[in-house]
Amino acid sequence: MSPEQRLVIVSNRLPLVMTRKDGAWQAAPGSGGLVTALAPVLRDRGGMWIGWPGSTEPPTDDLREAIAGAVDDTGYDLVPVFIDEEEKQLFYRVFSNEVLWPLFHDMTSRCRFLPEAWEVYGRVNQRFTDVIADQVREHDFLWIHDYHLMQVAGKLRRAGLDQRVGFFLHIPFPPVDVFMKLPWRRELLEDLLQFDIIGFQTQRDRRNFARSVSALLPDMATVRTSGQRTSIMTDSRTVLVGAFPIGIDATGFRRDASTEEVADRAWYLHENYPERQIVLGVDRLDYTKGIPEKLQAYRYMLRSEPEMIENVTLVQVVVPSRWEIPHYEQLKHEIERLVGEINGEFTRPGWVPVHYYYRPLSRPELLGYYRTAEALVASSWKDGMNLVAKEYCACKVDEPGVLLLSEFAGAAAQMYRDAIMFNPHDIAGMAAAMHRALMMPRDERSRRMRRLQRGVHRQDVFWWVDRFLQAALQRRLADFPTVNEFYPAASADEAAAQ
Ligand code: GDG
């Protein structure tokens, strides 16, 4: 391997958010599944992360300096791509989050297929491509992430760049009859076929993609599947298509959940929920996460199993997200109405059935809840993976807990044996699953949780990167050595030793 080979990650957002306070720019860590997963991978490897810093103000020298200065904390270069307010509206809000997001989660009725948004999607993908072309060195491996940037490889090829470029889709890929509704379906697939490797979260997503290519591009692509791998041949290249389920930094979560600070928080929670089991929900505000159904199932359980009254508390954390989009605002109102109704119906002196947060928790707060809760419910209608389910398992460092998981989360493919599975559209079924979890004997909880933890540690985020790099380049993450001997990045071997 060339010594200068770097791992260059490109995603819509940088792993930090720049905000202006008292005239000066400040960097705060970014949030969301993609950032949580990738930040520990790139840490101290001297590579590069290219993305939008979250502000739509025209770039100034002090903003650029503040971003470049954040490198000290990350151990890799941060290169911003700037977008303006109109582009934020049409590229990010409309095309990414009101076309691709609902379409890929099979919710076509929420799609707004605005032609001008497609145009601006192309324009912003071109801007990313220009920055990449400016930064990239001959031997770098470019790894593009997620649905915001599906045209980058096509545009790089058109600019004459032919190095290896990989793509990973964090969200599901829909069945062909859903994907076909996209007015620009052919153009998008053609651009995707300019990547050298395309990774999906599950085999189902891989199959859906292969079927869309066969159905929509029969004249220009030949699809061959052998076992769990698909190769797609076009005139210009062979594209490798596979399932690479994303993991978490399980060792890091376990370590952080074991600190004194988190132990104190866990103790405080135990004290405040005496003799009561906590059922936890942690979700971004999103209609794909099935939050109203979870609340309805909890209400159904309290109605049908009255011995649960006063013996259980649902703690639902909702992290504000995309609230400018009307569907998200309506969802917030629906959640708050349900929380109000449930609390109105069941509250007793000294007991409130639902504790509701509408704000992000700090990491120690979140880990304190993971560590304490007797059960966690991930009730997505559809989810690429659902990292929260995995994080919960990694953080159960003392008492075992029960994972309740939707059949439609990508995580189900790996966790279905030891989680309690349910269909999130079946309210009575989800209520029965909650009841079963709360009544589960301790030894069964332990057995299931131990196996879940083993899986989460074995197939962690470093395993995920290794598998992707292996398929893309016959390389492992360790081939991109750490640059800071005092803060070595955790390795797959280290995690495996756990
Ligand atoms: C997308 C796909 C896929 C949540 N609340 C707080 C908080 N979080 C962190 C969690 C977790 C992340 O946000 C959420 O990740 P998810 O995977 O559950 O969901 P998405 O954000 O929708 O992620 C998803 C993922 O990409 C990765 O490929 O799994 O399917 O939709 O890491 O810890 N963090 C803090 N406070 C909170 O209150 N600090």
Image: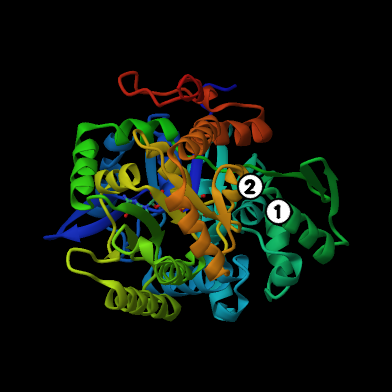
Of residues 317 and 51, the one nearer the viewer is 317
Q: Which residue is mark 1?
A: 204
Residue kind at label 1, given as amino acid type: Arg
Instruction: Look at the numbered discs 1 and 2 and tell me whether their residues touch, using CB distance below 8 Å.
Output: yes
> Are there few (<14), some (14-19), or many (20+) residues within 10 Å of tag 1?
some
> Are there few (<14), some (14-19), or many (20+) residues within 10 Å of tag 2?
some
Q: Secondary structure at mark 1?
A: helix
Position above or below: 324 against 76:
below
Q: Which residue is mark 2?
A: 413
* Outermost residue, front side: 307
Q: Secondary structure at mark 2?
A: helix
Q: Residue at x 46, y 57 (%)?
A: 435
Of residues 106 and 212, the one nearer the viewer is 106
Q: Where residue 113 sits in the image (x, y, percent)?
A: 59, 79
Q: Where residue 272 sits in the image (x, y, percent)?
A: 19, 52
Q: Residue at x 60, y 46 (%)?
A: 416
Position above or below: 68 against 54:
above
Spatial CA span between label 1 and label 2 = 10 Å
